[in-house]
Image (tube, rainbow, N blue to C red):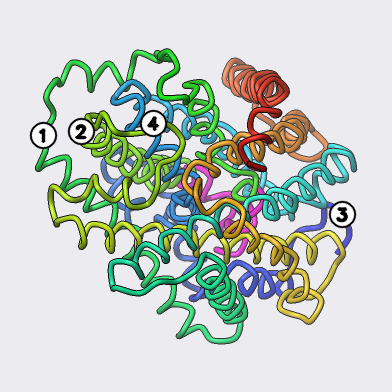
Amino acid sequence: MKPGEKIGDAELDALQVGLRMAHPPNPEALREECEELELLESAGYWPRTRRYLGLLGPGYLQSAMTLGGGTASAALFAGAVFGYSLLWVAPLGMVLGLVMLSAIAHQTLSTGQRPWPAMRQHAGPFFAWSWALGALAASLVWQFPQYALASAVLVDMADVAGWSLSPLATGSFVLALALLLSNLYGRSPLLLRLYERVLKYMVWGIVLCFGAVVLETGVSNWGDLLRGFFSFEIPADRNGVVAMTLVLSGISAAVGINMVFLYPYSLLARGWGREHRRMARFDLGLGMLLPYVLATSLIVIATANTLHLDPAYDGTRLSPVEAARSLAAVVGVAPGRMIFGLGILGMALSSITLQMLTCGFVCAEIFGWKFGGTRYRLATLLPIPGVLGCVYWSEIAIWVAVPTNVICGLFLPGAYAGFILLQRSRAYLGADMPQGTRGRIWIGAMGAITLFLLIFLGTYVARNGGHWWSILTA
């Protein structure tokens, strides 16, 4: 396919395999849906909203992607160390991401073009390659803390069952399981749907348990809780944890570059077009923002009500056993450790598999390989060295995800800059290029977000990279 060319049937079929679309869009049903959406444009807010609720899709997929080990680690530490003070971080991070993702949706749905070739043609090869290589690099880097997390909780779950397993043994098991699961994509739709359903239950099971903890422990001071959402306070360092580290980690975890790469392709694989532009914004708000903010807030509040009150808590050495203690008020210590372990395992395993698929997807897109082919599947094996994380970081498995969030956040500004150029490209968007006050506000917000990530993340990593390196190599 030539750069900028619209996606065809063959490419759409390939995307459905690469993006695990269990039910490809029916052309007739899609045509009727587009006609209905055109009529809804002139309908009232509530009739339009009721219909939109039945069409939620790619946004919820993004919510499931981002609710992984990095998000859980940042939220656990935020509540355990700083109580309610950092409740504002996750919502802010997601809102910043929504500004960019809504622009990406507008561009993709207005043109129907594959984003990577379009960026290469209209924004320039530098930004296109920065985007693709950033997604690839982040997928490789992120494997190390994910294996550390998954291995640590498996070791703890085995201990509850009366077994003694080494981190290397549990890490090797996770690797074998990830290889098996990544190989299911495009080959066994039935097993794939079963796997994704089980992971969804595991992840949302732990979220519900944290919600039960909040109900059980209550909220001692509603004023402090509300201030936590709106004060934008950065508290003083505590227990050896720098508050700014958690702020930048939480913001970086909300929308990762993996999501930014896969999101526009998930729209194309869904068969969405121009008629779905308003629907896409609604989908991002209700399908991604709301579940993410709800899940992260419950984790922060639950750990603030439990771990934050424990004077024995010791800085970055938060173990799965200590973290699982937050669930003891509801289900008991041993069951709490098992439920916490299953939830974190689901988050980590989902992220590991997704990052393997991202490596294959990025390589297939930039080199023109067939999705699901031999070279695609070999590319999914690139992240295998990440299993070493279970050996080197088993004692700080939860904390190690926090600085990794910040480091991977550095890959975002280059991709965002490319999308800013696309947003201002008349050759690309034509009459759909945002104009007037709305267009200026939109592009201004995109520019401000990009500068924030570039300056604050870059400066902070430069100042604290040596400290993190000493921790990771200790």
Query: Of marks 3 and 2, which one's residue comes earlier in the chain?
Result: 3
Residue 171 image position (x, y, % from top left):
55, 68
Q: Can you say whether 210 is above or below 272 in the image? A: above
Q: Which residue carries the number 4 mark?
A: 78
Residue 55 image position (x, y, % from top left):
39, 57
Residue 142 image position (x, y, % from top left):
63, 51
Q: Residue at x 63, y 63 (%)?
A: 387
Task: Please indicate, yes or no, whether residue 38 appears anywhere in the rendered image.
Answer: no
**Amino acid type, mark 4:** Ala
Between marks 2 and 1 in the image, the one whose residue lies nearer the viewer: 2
- Contact between marks 2 and 1 (CB within 8 A): the answer is yes
Identify the magenta region. 261-280
Q: Can you say whether 379 is above or below 409 in the image? A: below
User: Label 2: few (<14), some or many (≥20) within 10 Å?
Assistant: many
Q: CA distance from mark 4 to mark 2?
A: 12 Å
**Amino acid type, mark 3:** Pro
Q: Main secondary structure of the magenta part?
A: helix
Along the line of sight, the residue nearer the viewer: 416 or 148: 148
Between marks 3 and 1 in the image, the one whose residue lies nearer the viewer: 1
- Contact between marks 3 and 4 (CB within 8 A): the answer is no
**Amino acid type, mark 1:** Gly
Query: Of marks 3 and 4, which one's residue comes earlier in the chain?
Result: 3
Q: Which residue carries the number 1 mark?
A: 218
User: Label 3: few (<14), some or many (≥20) within 10 Å?
Assistant: some
For residue 305, the mark is 2
Q: CA distance from mark 2 to mark 1?
A: 8 Å
Residue 378 image position (x, y, % from top left):
77, 75
Q: Which residue carries the number 3 mark?
A: 3
